[in-house]
Image (cartoon, helix red, strand yellow):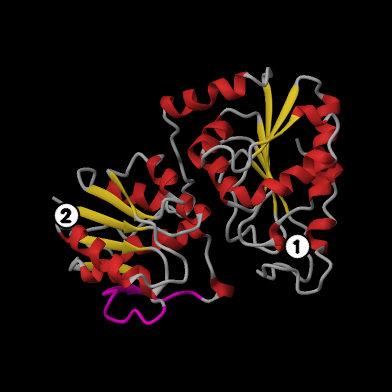
Amino acid sequence: MQRTLIIAPQWIGDAVMSQPLLAGLKQTNASQTIDVLCTPWVAPIYRACKEITKVIEVDFQHGILQWDLRRSIAKQIKANAYNRAFVLPNSFKSALIPWLAGIPIRIGYRGELRFGFINHVLANPSRQARTPMVEHYGQLLKISENSSPSFDHTSQPKLSISDEGVQEVKARIDALGTRTLYVFAPGAEYGPAKRWPSSHFAELATKILGKDTDAQIVILGSKADHSLAQEIQAYTKPIERIHNWCGVISLEEAMAVIAQCKQIISNDSGLMHIAAALAIPQIAIFGSSNPKHTPPLSKQAKVVWLGLACSPCYQRNCPLGHLDCLTKIEAEQVYTML
């Protein structure tokens, strides 16, 4: 029996965009077992992927080798007798466990100091030659054993929220007393150069709430986004109809909230990709990143990107100090797209 291990990326958006690879693997061999090794941060994404048999969570720390932990996990992994591993991140660390576990086929892109650790290798494209991430991961099917060389690069990620997940947040949503729920996702873990200004979000919120007296807005994000959400609340009228749930509910609960909203407005972020994979109507606002590389892959998605001469710069902070790629996107422009 074919047993496949996925070494998952650490960004939520990248995890979402790996789902079509999982679907492609199942198409080549429906009876195979696909397990994923990931951090708790992205584990909810893989629990929402129907192709995954088992989610193995390990609290790997960013920027630390954690040799003893990786060696211990490799011993546990070895007992599962995987035939192959797909190593999706490009780091040396991510290639260690499959190699230590003696998994015979280790598939991935050429990354940092990985010669020998990855034995079925694809060259990493330059930034200028980057394909969308779904296609980037899908290319790995071409060199995997017994896999078809074809991959539908137009595949859209698909996540499934369980009935239990919906019920977990139902009472919280019902307490808002609305049938018209909007979600804002103003954060972007990568950095400020991907965040539409809080003042713009607040202006948009005021327009939405002024037009629809039944509407409520929930702001979603991590604990790090809580103060950003407070800024938006402070400048929104009426303030009692906009709610800061950043860091208050889990990612799994946030996914269930998104699944039940009318529309989500977000930056280029993990929550943007989750909304796309749930086929929720959305408006995605891009600044320093490139919507051609990491677009929300959904027919329900609309993208706002000015495409200035200085963008995409892929920087965490605006190198020119003005952030025109985001500040010049007016709230009225986004509002007319709702």
Span of residues in magenta: 112-125
Q: What element carries label 1?
A: loop
| 201 to the left or right of 284 | right
Q: Label 1 crowding class (10 Å Cα cut-off): few <14, some 14-19, many 20+?
A: some
Q: Position of residue 288 (x, y in %)?
A: 70, 64
x 62%, y 45%: residue: 221
Q: Position of residue 110 (x, y in %)?
A: 39, 76
| Residue hosting label 1 | 307
In this rendering, the label closer to the viewer, 2 or 1: 2
The amino acid on which the numbered mark 2 sits, given as a three-letter code, is Asn
From the viewer's perspective, is residue 272 above or below residue 183? Answer: below
Task: Name the one closer to the observer, 85 or 76.
Answer: 76
Task: Name the one closer to the observer, 336 or 212.
Answer: 212
x 84%, y 67%: residue: 322
x 26%, y 80%: residue: 116
| Residue hosting label 2 | 80
The rendered magenta stretch, by its main secondary structure, is classed as: loop
| 150 to the left or right of 100 | right
The amino acid on which the numbered mark 1 sits, given as a three-letter code, is Gly
Which of the 4 quarters of the picture holds residue 203? top right
* N-terminal label among 2 and 1: 2
Can see residue 106? no
